[in-house]
């Protein structure tokens, strides 16, 4: 049986390579985000130059992560890509709808605390993971 | 969309895993296509046609078109 591939490496090898790249860029972005958040207060005492550098690093790693994620999606097969894209679309929608309602809760004084962006990120991440799991189960 | 992927695979005595490797997709994708749960992209349909050395329409059939012809 001849292998009918359109790309240079097998699906498994591509997925492994792009997953490692994605893990690297995501880890770098998370660490740079932590540095940007806590560095000014605990490490460099709000030094403007160092704060600027940390923000630029965070942006750089963030865009690297976006590109790595795109490459990861390109390397997947049709079905896996569809599952991932649907999960991302659902997470984006949930983020928008829940985010605005969360903001409205505070505006209408139904909650006493300030809405945090981190809560929204957690909800979006959980939605995305749940959607991926359900997607794989649907096409099992 | 209906398809004859399972029949064509069985005729050649290939497993889903072997066909998946040959088409550079996951075994789950082959299973989903065979069960009619997932329609492949045009590039994947072309790859399948090349692999089996037949025309795309001999593997995949439009159910709406088939109903209209009846």
Image (cartoon, coloured by chain):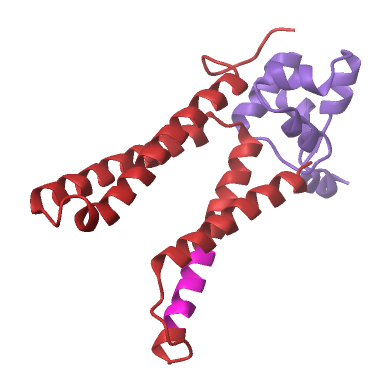
Chain colours: A red, B purple
x, y (%) of residue A101? 48, 79
At x 33% / y 50%, what residue is drawn? A34
Q: Nearer the viewer, residue A8 or A64?
A: A64
Instruction: Name the magenta segment's main secondary structure.
Output: helix
Q: Nearer the viewer, residue B56 or A83?
A: A83
In the image, is residue A43 above or below residue A81?
below
Query: Which quadrant of the view contains residue B32?
Result: top right
x, y (%) of residue B5? 81, 27
- The quarter of the picture where the N terminus of chain A appears is top right
x, y (%) of residue B45? 67, 28
Q: Is residue B58 visible?
A: yes
Tell me where the magenta segment starts and ends, as one range.
A93-104
At x 42% / y 40%, what residue is drawn? A26
In the image, is residue A87 above or below residue A23?
below
At x 51% / y 14%, what residue is drawn? A8
Which residue is the extreme one toward the bottom?
A109
Query: Which quadrant of the view contains residue A131?
Result: bottom right
């Amino acid at each position: 049986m001849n292998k009918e591939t359109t790309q240079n490496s097998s699906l498994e090898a591509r997925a492994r390579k792009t997953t490692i790249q994605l893990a690297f860029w995501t880890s770098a972005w998370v660490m740079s985000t932590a540095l940007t958040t806590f560095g000014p207060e605990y490490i460099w005492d709000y030094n403007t130059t160092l704060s600027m550098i940390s923000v630029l690093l965070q942006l750089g790693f963030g865009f690297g992560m976006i590109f790595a994620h795109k490459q990861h999606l390109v390397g997947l097969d049709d079905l896996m890509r569809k599952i991932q894209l649907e999960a991302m679309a659902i997470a984006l929608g949930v983020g928008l709808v829940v985010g605005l309602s969360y903001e409205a809760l505070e505006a209408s004084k139904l909650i006493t605390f300030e809405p945090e962006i981190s809560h929204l990120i957690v909800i979006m991440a959980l939605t995305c993971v749940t959607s991926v799991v359900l997607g794989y189960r649907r096409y099992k | 969309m209906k398809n004859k992927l399972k029949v064509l695979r069985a005729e050649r005595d290939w497993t889903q895993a072997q066909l998946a490797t040959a088409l550079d997709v996951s075994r789950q994708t082959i299973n989903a296509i065979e069960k009619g749960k997932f329609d492949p992209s045009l590039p994947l349909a072309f790859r399948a046609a090349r692999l089996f050395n037949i025309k795309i329409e001999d593997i995949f059939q439009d159910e709406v078109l088939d109903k209209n012809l009846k």
